[in-house]
Amino acid sequence: MRFIIMHKTNAHWESGAIPSPELVARVGTLLVALAKTGALLGAEGLRATSEGVRLRFSGGKQTIVNGPFEGDHELPAGFSIVRTRSLDEAIAWATRQGKILGDVEIDIRPVTEPWDIGMAAAPADLDTRRYMVLRKATPATEDGVAPTPAQRVEVADLVAETAASGVHLATETMRPSRRGRRYKNSRDGVSVFDGPFIETKEMIAGYVIVSAASMEEAGRCAVQYLDAVEADEVDLRELE
């Protein structure tokens, strides 16, 4: 089974701060350990919401709001990673997806690259960057209702077309949050809460994707991740 472990942003990261060498080393040690066991499937961080946009689709109309954002309805249902030459191109891709899915809210934020945080120099010939296109949960996704067959075909066509051109890199869909868990730091240690998480207002700062035989096994990774990133809480969700 595959699981995603997500930690949340806060005022520190929203200010544009970069991770300390100690934090980078601590997270790197965890990722290496997970990779050695074959559990690590992916990991990314995200830039501040001031660098992103929010798209709202309702009744056939689209609204675009520039960041930064205050947490509102932040429960994720899934995301895609795209590589484009500009934020506008990422918006164009997300707009095509949103028009297929109907009434939905989508956030677009740059993925953190090593050169964004001073770990390496950007390639001299690089003229693109990666963006996360994050789809928010709806009552339907939280009820486990799948897109219609027609929607699935249109999304598959969008992915196939843009993957061939190197734009679409990955897509993940989360199972309803009632099947997830939240791990929170407290003075008494780590507290665990079962989903659903309808009132989630905290925005994602980064994630790891792991392979695990059970929720309990993935939960042990979540506790390690919570400690490594020094987060107040992380959410653990099943991936389809």
Image: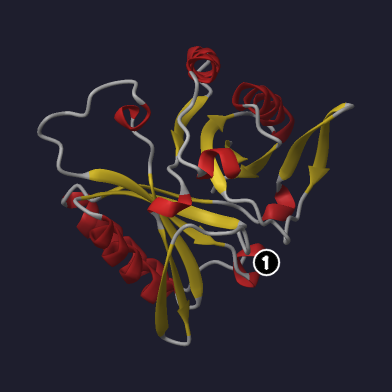
Between 200 and 42, the residue placed more toward the observer is 200
Tell me the kind of residue under disc 1: Asp
Residue corresponding to mark 1: 143
Q: Nearer the viewer, residue 108 or 38?
A: 108
In the rendered image, residue 33, in percent from the top left (x then y), is placed at: 54, 13
Point 53% across, 59% down: residue: 69
Q: In the rendered image, which quarter contains the N terminus? A: top right
Residue 130 falls in which quadrant of the image?
top left
Crowd tier of the residue under label 1, counting other residues whose Cα lies within 10 Å: few below 14, some 14–19, many 20 or above: few
Tally of numbered discs:
1
Q: Quadrant of residue 221?
A: top right
Residue at x 71%, y 30% (from the top left corner): 219
Q: Residue 224: x percent and y percent?
A: 66, 22
| Residue lying at the far right of the rendered structure | 188
Relative to residue 205, is residue 141 depicted above or below?
below
In the foreground, 119 or 98: 119
Where 74 sits versus 140, above or below? above
The residue drawn where x is 19% and y is 47% is: 166
Toward which corner of the image does residue 64 lie, by quadrant? Answer: bottom left
Q: Residue at x 58, y 51 (%)?
A: 203
Rendered view: 240 above or below 24: below
